[in-house]
Image: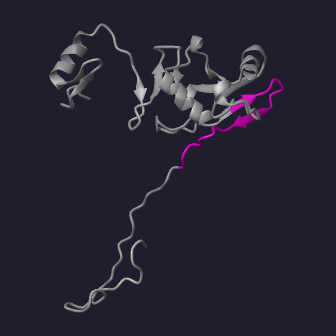
Amino acid sequence: MTLLGVSEEDGHLAGYGPIDAETARDLAARAPSFRRLLTHPESGVVLSVGRESYRVPSDLRAWLRIRDETCRFPGCNRRSEGCDVDHIAPWQTGGETDHRNLIHLCRHHHRIKHETAWSVSASDSGSADPFASPDDVIWTSPSGRTYVDHPAIPRPARLSVEPRPQLDLGAGSGPAEGGPEPSFPDLPPF
């Protein structure tokens, strides 16, 4: 937002440190190019480099390893540490290096995906949350049967937070003025 002039927050120049908003805008205006990185707002983990790079950054790779735990082919229990990271939609045909387009596949199932009639796609629940875990991975066999693989860390359920109803205690429902303070039956911790 600082680059757009909407905010006056300081920028951060890699290898240097904090810089004021005006200097950040000046440097950005003179930059020959930009690299887009989508990071998690709290952890700073890179979630996407888009079409900038085929190579998966190490922090995104670590996050995927935790999310997947195992090969994402249904029924395979090969640990993700021994698997390849694969683009669901191939990078060569426009797929992005993005957490929603990357899964772990053991070498055997990686070959099956690329050398047979098996196909894989990521389901899309239509969530507008760019930081949500990917949806289930849907595999289709050569005969047309579908199998669903769920990530080890499931998408958190959306909570509907509604305001608490206000209680109408009415007149005279509180302690009488000058009366005793309410007592609590238990001592902390409750």
| Quadrant including the C terminus | bottom left
Q: Is residue 99 above or below residue 94?
A: below
Q: Is 123 on the left or on the right of 119, as rendered?
A: left
**Residue 42 or 52: which is nearer the viewer?**
42
Q: Is 102 on the left or on the right of 8, as rendered?
A: right
Q: Residue at x 50, y 26 (%)?
A: 60
Q: Is residue 17 above or below residue 189?
A: above
| Quadrant including the N terminus | top left
Q: Is 88 on the left or on the right of 25, as rendered?
A: right
Q: Residue at x 64, y 34 (%)?
A: 69
- Magenta stretch, residue numbers: 138-157
Q: Is residue 156 magenta?
A: yes
Q: Residue 48: where, in percent of width, then height? A: 47, 24
Task: Write down the quadrant of residue 151 in the picture.
Answer: top right
Q: Residue at x 44, y 57 (%)?
A: 161
Q: Residue 11: where, in percent of width, then height? A: 24, 25
